[in-house]
Amino acid sequence: MVEVAEVARTPLISVRGLVKSFGPIRAVDGVSLDIYPGEVLGVIGDNGAGKSTFLSLLAGFHRPDAGRLLYRGREVSLGSPRVARRRLRIEMVYQDLRLAPDLTVWENLFLGEELRVLGVLSNRRQMRARAERVLHELNTGIRPDDVLSELSGGEQQSVAIARAILFDRDVVIMDEPTAAISVGKVEEVLRLVRELKGYGKTVLLVSHRLEDVLRVADRIVVFYHGRIRRVLENRGLQVADLVHEMF
Ligand SMILES: Nc1ncnc2c1ncn2[C@@H]1O[C@H](COP(=O)(O)OP(=O)(O)OP(=O)(O)O)[C@@H](O)[C@H]1O
Ligand SMILES: [Mg+2]
């Protein structure tokens, strides 16, 4: 019998010695980290510290030059967004969102993941209904037929986040979700981060807004020149402590 506390401490994802270079630049320079189920992990660091590259490796958007990834204790090869989504159950919300502005909300929710029934694209009504249910469940106030480009930046973030619930991902990676949105909408994004945690999902949140990170993170990872310099428990931490670790 394994104790409950032991189970809770088993990492969902472990990475060891990840390296990724772009030409002469070692963007990620030997990163090891354990990521636990249901935690909100803040990821901070100066511009160019390697945060986005590290997260893109997890999301399968880049292939690492070296390093291993264990998912629930099993080695998984990185480098394919499809594997990241289907096997690691990771959904990444990119800095630039990568949604289709001219399509509706529900079409965006199913972008690249269209429902198939017996190999045939299933009907739009079914997808739309599922989209409506998730948007309602998350209390977003967004309608499935809204056209994406007519939503605010924060609402577009919400659409990207809703995909994680819709496809039941375990891990949601958000790269600067609050960078380009109005102050009022920041609250909405932070609320959704807590909501995801409430669903038992792991959230990796990259942000330069250190106050936001302090408000939602359980632990905070500090990147510095492609490496993890510190992993901090978010207990009694202040912005000044984080700034001190970052520079
Ligand atoms: N596709 C790429 N091609 C070449 N160099 C890259 C590429 N992506 C990132 N880099 C370089 O790798 C380093 C790390 O970049 P990365 O985007 O991961 O940093 P970051 O911590 O996300 O920074 P920011 O806070 O500005 O978003 C930087 O020196 C950057 O210029
Ligand atoms: Mg970045």
Image (cartoon, rainbow, N blue to C red):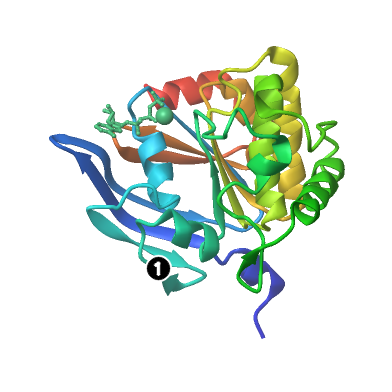
> Looking at the image, can residue 12 be seen?
no
- The residue that appears at 85% across and 49% down in the rendered structure is 133
Q: Is residue 55 left or right of residue 90?
A: left
Q: Where residue 109 sits: x, y (%)?
A: 67, 44
- Residue 181: which quarter of the image? top right
Residue assigned mark 1:
76
How many numbered dots are placed on residues in this image? 1
Q: Is residue 120 above or below residue 164?
A: below
221 or 174: which is nearer to us? 174
124 or 236: which is nearer to us? 124
User: Ligand 2 falls in which quarter?
Assistant: top left
Q: Where residue 16 sits: x, y (%)?
A: 34, 58
Q: Is residue 7 left or right of residue 230?
A: right
- Residue 2: which quarter of the image? bottom right
Q: Quadrant of the N terminus?
A: bottom right
- The residue that appears at 68% across and 58% down in the rendered structure is 168
- Disc 1 crowd, CA 10 A, few/some/many (<14, 14-19, 20+): some
Q: Is residue 104 above or below residue 61?
A: above
Q: Find numbered disc 1 in the image and state the secondary structure of the residue it sits on.
A: loop
- The residue that appears at 53% across and 63% down in the rendered structure is 86
Q: Where residue 179 sits: x, y (%)?
A: 56, 20
Question: Three-letter amino acid code at disc 1?
Answer: Val
Q: Is residue 184 left or right of residue 82?
A: right
- The residue that appears at 62% across and 70% down in the rendered structure is 6
Q: Where residue 143 sits: x, y (%)?
A: 82, 34
In the current view of this chain or complex, which residue is farthest to the left?
24
